[in-house]
């Protein structure tokens, strides 16, 4: 799965800030999710310059095929299917199911000053869920789990 950092058309060329491989074993009924940090410095596969190195997140600038080939090369595995999403996709999916419940370890107000989250369970619509998932500026350690 590749998650782009933009709103609007899914065909828009953007960073792929979220890169993960989801392996499904139907026989054992197991799912393994492997999150790949976007800051990994990797060989971008599928470009004219076969030695091109950059952050994995920048592979999205060259299209989803480059992102997929780069992850396949990095993990030495074949990816049979992919899912590409962006901010609009997340908001639409959450709204389509009527919102979601999330648990927060901290009470905070988002950096856009629009959304407020309580310690514990929070019921969120699509916009609030996306902001919750992306928030880091409200925390002294940024992306770390400490508030």
Image: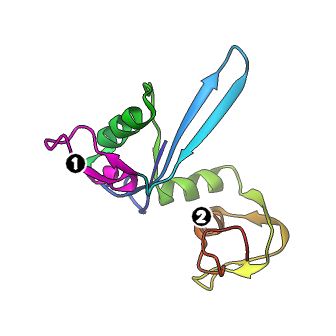
State the residue lying farthest toward the bottom: 113
**Colour setting:** rainbow
Residue shown at 13% from the left, 41% from the top? 48
**Label 2 neighbourhood size at 10 Å, few (<14), some (14-19), many (20+)?**
some
Label located before the other in sequence (1 or 2): 1
Q: Residue at x 58, y 40 (%)?
A: 34
Q: Is residue 44 above or below residue 113?
A: above
The residue under label 1 is: 52
Q: Which residue is mark 2?
A: 130
Q: Report the residue at 62% width, 62% height from top.
A: 126
> Magenta residues, as a range?
41-61
Q: Magenta span has 89? A: no
Q: Percent position (x, y) of residue 102?
A: 77, 60
In the rendered structure, does residue 56 fall within the stretch colored magenta?
A: yes
Look at discs 1 and 2 and give the one toward the viewer.
Answer: 1
**Quadrant assignment for the C terminus:** bottom right
Q: Is residue 34 left or right of residue 42?
A: right
CB contact under 8 Å: marks 1 and 2? no
Figure quadrant of residue 39: bottom left
| Residue extending furthest toward the top | 27
């Amino acid at each position: 799965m590749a998650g782009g950092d933009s709103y609007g058309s899914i065909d828009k060329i953007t960073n792929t800030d979220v890169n993960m491989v989801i392996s499904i074993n139907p026989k054992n009924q197991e799912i393994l999710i492997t999150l790949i940090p976007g800051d990994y410095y990797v060989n971008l596969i599928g470009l004219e310059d076969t030695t091109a190195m950059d952050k994995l997140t920048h592979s999205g600038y060259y299209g989803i095929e480059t992102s997929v080939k780069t992850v396949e090369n990095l993990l030495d595995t074949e990816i049979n299917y992919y899912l590409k999403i962006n901010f609009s996709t997340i908001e639409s999916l959450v709204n389509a199911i009527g919102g979601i419940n999330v648990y927060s370890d901290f009470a905070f107000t988002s950096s856009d000053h629009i959304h407020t989250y309580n310690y514990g369970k929070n019921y969120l619509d699509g916009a609030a869920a996306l902001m919750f998932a992306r928030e880091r500026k409200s925390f002294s350690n940024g992306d770390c789990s400490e508030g």
